[in-house]
Image (tube, grey):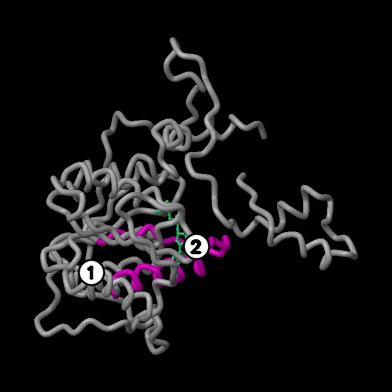
Amino acid sequence: MGRSSKDKRDIYYRLAKEEGWRARSAFKLLQLDEEFNLFKGVRRAVDLCAAPGSWSQVLSRKLRASNESCEEVKIVAVDLQAMAPLPGVTQIQGDITKVSTAQEIIRHFEGQAADLVVCDGAPDVTGLHDVDEYIQAQLLLAALNITTHVLKPGGNFVAKIFRGKDVTLLYSQLKIFFSMVTCAKPRSSRNSSIEAFVVCQNYSPPDGYIPNMSNPLLDHSYDVDFNQLEGPNRIIVPFLACGDLSAFDSDRTYPLQLDSNKEYKYLPPTQPPIQPPYQQACHLRKNNLLAKEDLPSALLGLGALNLGT
Ligand code: SAM
């Protein structure tokens, strides 16, 4: 596959590089904002599952541009993986399902509440749909738990969701905490993907609710076959396609020269991955060391490597 073939197949991948975003997902948050005006009046935001950081970039650019004093803007970004720094963004490398991570986020706000929490969390997809949906739901609930600790009443929460068969249970749980829950599909999210985003507006927890990090989906006595949600417990949330309908279609292939007056020029990614998990494999392959008997000694040189690819 040539270097430009992904540019050709994926218009948002190419646009991300042209506009300096670290990942094409930036457009998903931008298009959600177009529809829901998410950034209005926001000074403190949390970006959960943030690496490589394109949502944090969007938050940093938008919030710092709309607030007179950049000092007042506080963005906390959390991910398992390390992320290259961004202006105005404090990073926490941690697991969002852990209480210690929630505590660290809360500490950063020094008693103040966040106006917005976003989460684009996704597990490493296995291809086994039930497993992928289950893990994704765990991430969403972990994000919701953290949100109940840090979000101000009236604040908003946006999170990636897989529209699998148990999605109604998730909607029901979100509806307990937010007066408005919408399932939104930005133009930049491929139709072929079950991914969508829940936009939860106006945080209003039940009276007397005390935030905790327990996770109802880890309750082994819950069984979706028996515990079917019915009557008022069954929540149907509005579904909204968002982003200008004249925007690029993420499932279409576009010509390499969108503007016929300009010549196509390949651009490298804005932020190459730091410490990617495949770094070791790349090193072994580049040096023709795969499946060699002297593997352990070959690995010794890895510590000094800095593959900026
Ligand atoms: N929004 C990001 C952006 O725009 O650059 C992309 C996020 S990427 C789709 C999903 C991220 O979720 C990965 O970086 C992964 O490390 C992170 N993640 C998955 N499970 C996590 C967990 N338990 N705690 C923290 N981060 C997690």
Bounds of the magenta segment: 117-145
Residue designated by label 1: 109
Asked if the magenta segment contains residue 102, the reply would be no
Which numbered disc flags the more N-terminal residue, 2 or 1? 2
User: In screen coordinates, is 162 left or right of 275?
Assistant: left
Secondary structure at badge 1 equals loop
Amino acid under disc 1: Phe
Q: Secondary structure at mark 2?
A: loop
Q: Amino acid at mark 2?
A: Gln
| Quarter placement of the C terminus | top right
Q: Which residue is mark 2?
A: 81
Residue at 28% across / 58% down in the picture? 75
Q: Foreground: 16 or 122?
A: 16
Mark 1 nearby-residue class (10 Å; few <14, some 14–19, many ≥20): some
**Marks 2/1: CA distance?**
22 Å
**Residue at mark 2: C-beta within 8 A of ligand 1:** yes
Residue 229, compared with residue 3, is above or below; it is below
Quadrant location of the N terminus in the rendered image: top right
Residue at image location 68% in from the left, 55% down from the top: 305
Q: Which of the two discs, 2 and 1, sits closer to the camera?
A: 1
Front residue of 46 and 138: 46
Position of residue 93 measured from the top left corner of the image (x, y, whole percent): 44, 67
Residue 293 on image: x %, y %:
90, 65
Tell whether 272 sits left or right of 146. Answer: right
Q: Which is more toward the observer, 31 or 17?
A: 17
Indicate the position of residue 264 as horizontal and vertical percent values.
Answer: 52, 19
Which residue extends farthest bottom? Answer: 221
In the image, residue 139 lies at what x, y percent?
Answer: 40, 69
Measured along the vertical axis of the image, is residue 8 above or below residue 216? Answer: above
